[in-house]
Image (tube, rainbow, N blue to C red):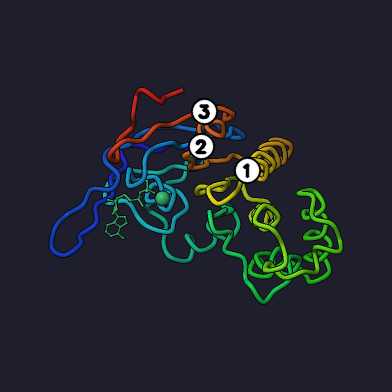
Amino acid sequence: MLQVANVTKKFNSAGSDVTAVSDISFSVETGDFASIIGKSGSGKSTLLSLLGGLDQPSNGSIEIDGKDIARLGDHALIDYRCKRIGFVFQNYNLIPNLSALENVMLPMEFAGTSKRSRRVRASELLNQVGITDEKQSRKPGRLSGGEQQRVSIARALANNPSLILADEPTGNLDTHASANVRQILHDLTRQLGTTVIAVTHDVTFANAADRRIGIVDGQIDPEWQM
Ligand SMILES: Nc1ncnc2c1ncn2[C@@H]1O[C@H](COP(=O)(O)OP(=O)(O)O)[C@@H](O)[C@H]1O
Ligand SMILES: [Mg+2]
């Protein structure tokens, strides 16, 4: 269970305060697939970085299974990001000079998994997202956008996280690849019991979720709430 209570994030840019997230509260049940929908600049990416412990809120608490991540020390936070969270980005963020397989193995190296287990697990995950053995040895530049995003989903799942945070995961894909990535993310996380919070502009994507959280000007938008 993820519980966000009265979270606010202010930035100071060029001497003036910008409130990117303003007093947001919501909760997501373990294993649920939640979508966050809102216009550009509404505070979605800021909220995701707070949930992922990439940034700290100015106010409020973010509890995951009863533990407030806004109050974790540096080491605990690094450990939390590495072992409990998987990130999926709009631009895939794969490492260009590593193969698909090596990209998926990397987070397991940070987590201290043995090389042999890393290779076996990475290959299994890639098969689960539909990346064949031949494609696993390719570098990201030789894969399509949809394939790269499927590799990044496999990478996000590598350390068996309890929460996946996805920022516009289908934002750069055509309709067909988009539907495919959405389906794989949905089915695989459901099968594994992983909680997902996905930011999206895409109404089809948002409507396929168990929960829908709307954001407007850094605040919850009751019109989109589901
Ligand atoms: N590091 C930052 N410094 C200053 N302002 C920021 C920073 N990050 C985001 N903002 C501002 O916060 C608001 C929300 O941004 P963002 O979370 O990226 O929105 P979204 O992802 O919904 O497009 C915007 O006005 C943006 O300019
Ligand atoms: Mg954004």
Please state which of residues 93 and 163 is positioned toward the viewer in this rendering. 93
Q: Is mark 3 within 8 Å of ligand 1?
A: no
| Rendered image quadrant of residue 120 | bottom right
Q: SS for tag 2?
A: loop
Mark 2 or mark 3: whose residue is earlier in sequence:
2
Provide residue 7's location: percent of width, then percent of height.
32, 42
Please state which of residues 67 and 168 is positioned toward the viewer in this rendering. 168
Whether residue 155 is situated above or below residue 190 in the rendered picture: below
Q: Check whether the beta carbons of the residues at disc 1 and disc 2 lie within 8 A of each other.
A: yes
Counting every numbered tag in the picture gives: 3
Whole-Å distance between the Cαs marked 1 and 2?
10 Å
Q: Check whether the beta carbons of the residues at disc 2 and disc 3 lie within 8 A of each other.
A: no
Disc marking residue 211: 3
Provide residue 19's location: percent of width, then percent of height.
23, 48
Q: Is mark 2 within 8 Å of ligand 2?
A: no
Disc 3 crowd rating (10 Å Cα; few below 14, some 14-19, many 20+) is: some
Q: Report whether 124 appears left or right of 171.
A: right
Three-letter residue code for mark 1: Ser
Which residue position holds label 1?
A: 178
Mark 1 or mark 2: whose residue is earlier in sequence:
1
Residue drawn 67% across the image and 41% down it:
176
Q: SS for tag 3?
A: strand
Disc 2 crowd rating (10 Å Cα; few below 14, some 14-19, many 20+) is: some
Which residue position holds label 2?
A: 202
* Residue 187 in view: yes
Three-letter residue code for mark 3: Arg
Three-letter residue code for mark 2: Asp
Provide residue 42's location: percent of width, then percent of height.
33, 43
| Rendered image quadrant of residue 108 | bottom right
Residue drawn 52% across the image and 32% down it:
206
Q: SS for tag 1?
A: helix
Nearest to viewer (mark 2 / mark 3)? 2
